[in-house]
Amino acid sequence: MSTAASLRSKWKDGTPVFGLWAALPTPFSIELMAYPGVGYVCVDQQHGVIDYAMAVDMFRAAEGRGLVPFTRVPANETWMISKALDAGAQGVIVPLVNTRAEAAAAVAACRYPPTGVRSYGPIRATVISAARDMETLGDSVLCFIMVETREALENIEEIASTPGLDGIYIGPADLAIGLGLPPDLDKTELEHVAAVERIRDACKRNNIVAGIQCATGKFGRDYAERGFGLVTIAKDSAILQAGVRKEIQVANGGADKVAKIGYT
């Protein structure tokens, strides 16, 4: 069974890990996307249309297909983070973290006392980890926080040096909004590129993993070569939309013709 330990081992060797994003509420999408070479899948409980019970089923699908299950929790709330980890997520990605104090709160929610505040009740995590002790259950899981705003960028050195933090995951679209740019992925504007490099460099200085969301494998490869270790290359809903868009364009005689008959 793939656990966070397998990712830590790759990062120790300097090997990037490519993964997927799941926004659709079905374990089947994860089973379909679990192609050789994919290391993890993140179940999106923030912007995806996925509730808690479905998230557990999706963790199970990831485990069954040899992928490490992450989840992006809806908010930086202790109960949300610990409940996801109790359900068997091997790592959390916590959105909209802007300060060192907020990063420390996310880390504390992942760890048991005395280093954290996580309540003991690993209802499913004990099955996945084959352990019940707090050190194994609390220290083994991965805690990533998201840098998505100008405020967070200005505080990047303090955030990256937060004790116990495993990595920083860049949300390119929200970061773009913070910089006054259009909210999309695979950004090439110089200000955005510089911000991404600034975050990566802070991660490197503090010996934590830099992660980022991409829309294509091409950009994913580029980021991996630039030192990113956790690289999301595709999202299930986006793949589905892109596939349908391509085929309907072909069926209707090309993109220009599709636009004329009102498809968007």
Image (cartoon, grey):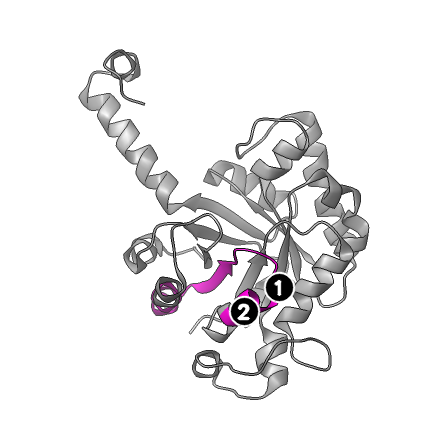
- Which badge, 2 or 1, comes first in the chain's sequence? 2
**Which residue has dot 1 on it?**
143
**Callout 2: helix, strand or loop?**
helix
Residue 8 part of the magenta segment: no
On the image, the x and y values in percent for residue 244 come to 26, 33
- From mark 2 to mark 1, how far is it between C-alphas? 10 Å
**101, above or below 232, in the image:** below
Q: Quadrant of residue 139?
A: bottom right
**Callout 1: helix, strand or loop?**
strand
Residue appearing at x 59%, y 52% in the figure: 95
Q: Nearer the viewer, residue 226 or 235?
A: 235
How many numbered badges does the structure rendering display? 2
Q: Is residue 81 visible?
A: yes
Amino acid at dot 2: Ala
Q: Is residue 198 visible?
A: no
**122, above or below 39, in the image:** below
Identify the disc placed on residue 97: none
Residue appearing at x 48%, y 78% in the figure: 125
Amino acid at dot 1: Cys
**258, above or below 25, in the image:** above
Which quarter shows the C terminus?
A: top left
Q: Nearer the viewer, residue 67 or 108?
A: 108
Residue appearing at x 25%, y 12% in the figure: 257
Residue 62 part of the magenta segment: yes
On the image, the x and y values in percent for residue 102 come to 71, 58
Which quarter shows the N terminus?
A: bottom left
On the image, the x and y values in percent for residue 169 come to 61, 51
Mark 2 surroundings within 10 Å by alpha-carbon count, few (fewer than 14), some (14 through 19), many (20 or more): some
Q: Which residues are magenta?
A: 58-83
Q: Name the side, left or right, on which 68 lies relative to 181.
A: left
**Which residue has dot 2 on it?**
4
